[in-house]
Image: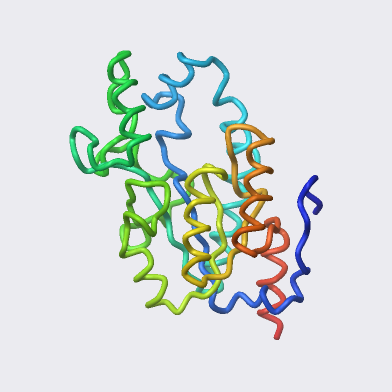
Amino acid sequence: MEVAGLVRYPPPRSPLMNLENAALIVVDMQRYYLESSSAFAQFHTDKEPGCLDYIHQRCLETVIPNISKLISRFESAGLPILFLRLCGDAEDRSDLQRTFSKVHHQAAERGYPGLYPLRSEPHSEVISQFSSADTERTFCKTTYSAFTSAPSFDARLQSLGCQTLIFTGLATSQCVETTARDAADRDYQIIHVENAQADYSETTHRASLYSSQGVCGGQILDTGDVLGALAHNDSN
């Protein structure tokens, strides 16, 4: 698989692709991002009609099926899967990073309360397609990076002995890339699964991957690459 404008790193035979100590990270695949009935979707669509069409279509056709394949394979291999959720605990959303808090209040002023749902509210949940997103595997954050606002996330990774993090989810240039950069600073090896991530445009998605690749020193692969590496590990 070639991604235009991106430099490919070594194929699965590279030592970096030994996934014995890898964890699959599923970032912010939540109902409020992906369901048209949510205040998030309705506010942004009212503000800029069609702005969510690309990301919703890509998630439906590409990202969700590929993450589902990865989840199934990681579970069968007994490898960790961790889910992230962006949501608040404070009623006024004062605990959210300032950009999220600002947009939340702008939406409420325009008649769309609950743009960023509370942790306890159904729209903050991981989408139902990923039934393995139980409490034990899920970490809530209030910032772009899970390392900033969910300290138990890093603690769990360390307790599991994880060395490589395989990133999927939303949005490539925002919470995915920011968490990956923080992970690289903590000496985790980074793999981005290109066709298991999405952004609000193809251009932003690819630019983010290119930028993250340079900073994190990781790999940009597709779902087939990762599944092939797992099969190769099983055979050795």
Q: What x and y, as percent, mark residue 182?
A: 47, 60
- Figure colour scheme: rainbow
Please give the count of numbered marks on the rendered protein: 0
Q: Is residue 140 left or right of residue 201?
A: left
Q: Is residue 15 left or right of residue 68?
A: right
Q: What x and y, as percent, mark residue 192?
A: 62, 57
Where 37 sits versus 3, above or below?
above
Q: What x and y, as percent, mark residue 103?
A: 36, 27
Residue at left offset 70%, top offset 86%: 236
User: In the image shown, does 30 or 187 lie closer to the viewer?
Assistant: 187
User: In the image shown, does 212 or 121 lie closer to the viewer?
Assistant: 212
User: In the image shown, does 233 or 159 lie closer to the viewer?
Assistant: 159
Q: What x and y, as percent, mark residue 92?
A: 20, 32
- Extreme-bottom residue of the structure: 236
Quadrant in the rendering for residue 199 = top right
Q: Is residue 55 left or right of residue 139?
A: right
Quadrant in the rendering for residue 41 = top left
Please state, as top left, top right, bottom left or bottom right, where the N terminus lies in the image. bottom right
User: In the image shown, does 21 or 63 lie closer to the viewer?
Assistant: 21
Where 29 sits versus 181, above or below?
above
Residue at left offset 61%, top offset 75%: 19
Residue at left offset 67%, top offset 43%: 207
Residue at left offset 61%, top offset 54%: 212
Quadrant in the rendering for residue 89 = top left
Where 104 sits versus 48, above or below?
below
